[in-house]
Image (cartoon, rainbow, N blue to C red):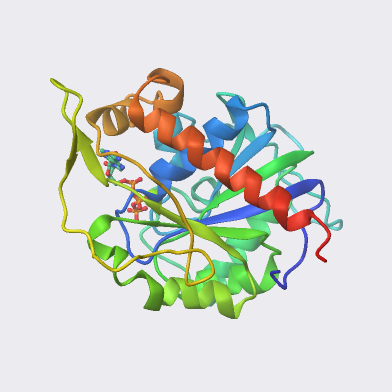
Amino acid sequence: MGQGMRLQGISHVLAIASGKGGVGKTTVSVNLALALAQAGARAGLFDADLYGPNIPWMLGVRRKQAAPGEVPVARTRRDPYITPLERFGLKVMSVGFVVGDNDAVMPDPIFAGHIIRQTLQDVRWGELDYLLLDFPPGSGEPQRTLLSTIHIDGAVIVTTPQDLALMDASRSLGMFRQAGVPILGVVENMSYLICPHCGERIELFHRSPRPWAVEGDGVAALGRIPMDIAVSRAVNAEHPLVQAHSGSPAATAFREIAAAIAGKLVDDQRPRV
Ligand SMILES: Nc1ncnc2c1ncn2[C@@H]1O[C@H](COP(=O)(O)OP(=O)(O)OP(=O)(O)O)[C@@H](O)[C@H]1O
Ligand SMILES: [Mg+2]
């Protein structure tokens, strides 16, 4: 289990992470959170990507004007004070709301980690079953600071087929293992295509013949998300896939992965014999 401080009222804090950028971490975070909410869970989504916060953009939420008294000038108490935004039944907050979309000056990496942690702790999340953290890509200092200060119940690693073979040795897995955070498994995104005419599944990338991701011998495979124009179009149109195209193969894959994650977390809580 992670070593940091527990966020009150939240049953499971999950990190959605990747070794490199652009593999679909934010897309996966948004759609998994929606799939969990659709299954009846109370879910929240926190954009911890200080360097490229785009959850607000994907969900069509904007920074709102702070109500008088909402932003304390000199804080004497440590109670959370930021009301999260609500969208599609999710509670949403982005570190981008604090830092600003166009700020050219970036804080140094350790300080960045503390800004993310503080923002996370300042939100009035209330009672949640799951809080998904969209991590910055890679295994740099903000991620490490976050892992050492916030208790995280599990990590979901997003990858693409091209990088799958390198996964076992990857730094991001090492970072979570070192911090004592259980790795729930890997989501393979942009994994294959479904032919729009005949429905056939088309493999686009060479797959390693070695049996990868056998449980007990590495990291579990949580599922594969097809490459689908609906995934990017839905997100750009601010209607995430699981809501807008709920019958599509990709939406089905997201729901199955969400169920697998929920199942693993329940298993983890059973007393061990
Ligand atoms: N399964 C998919 N099918 C089609 N397009 C996808 C899929 N997954 C992601 N995309 C598209 O790929 C791009 C990158 O996705 P996304 O922003 O989620 O990646 P990221 O890992 O969060 O990137 P960053 O590291 O920049 O934060 C986006 O334009 C997104 O719409
Ligand atoms: Mg992202």
Residue at 66% across, 61% down:
152
- In screen coordinates, is 99 left or right of 154? left
Q: Residue 124: where, in percent of width, then height?
A: 75, 42
- Image quarter hosting the N terminus: bottom right
Rendered-image quadrant of the C terminus: bottom right
Q: Nearer the viewer, residue 138 or 242?
A: 242
In the image, is 23 to the left or to the right of 132?
left
Q: Relative to residue 200, is residue 270 depicted above or below?
A: below
Q: Nearer the viewer, residue 264 or 124?
A: 264
Q: Is residue 241 left or right of residue 81?
A: left
> Looking at the picture, does residue 60 appear above or below residue 6?
above
Q: Is residue 74 visible?
A: no
- The x and y percentages for residue 73 are 74, 51
At a point 61% along the width and 70% down the height, the residue shown is 147
At which x and y percent is residue 149?
69, 70
Query: Could one spot residue 75 in this view of the protein?
Result: yes
User: Compared to 27, does 167 lie above or below?
Assistant: below
Residue 14 percent across, percent down from the top left? 61, 54
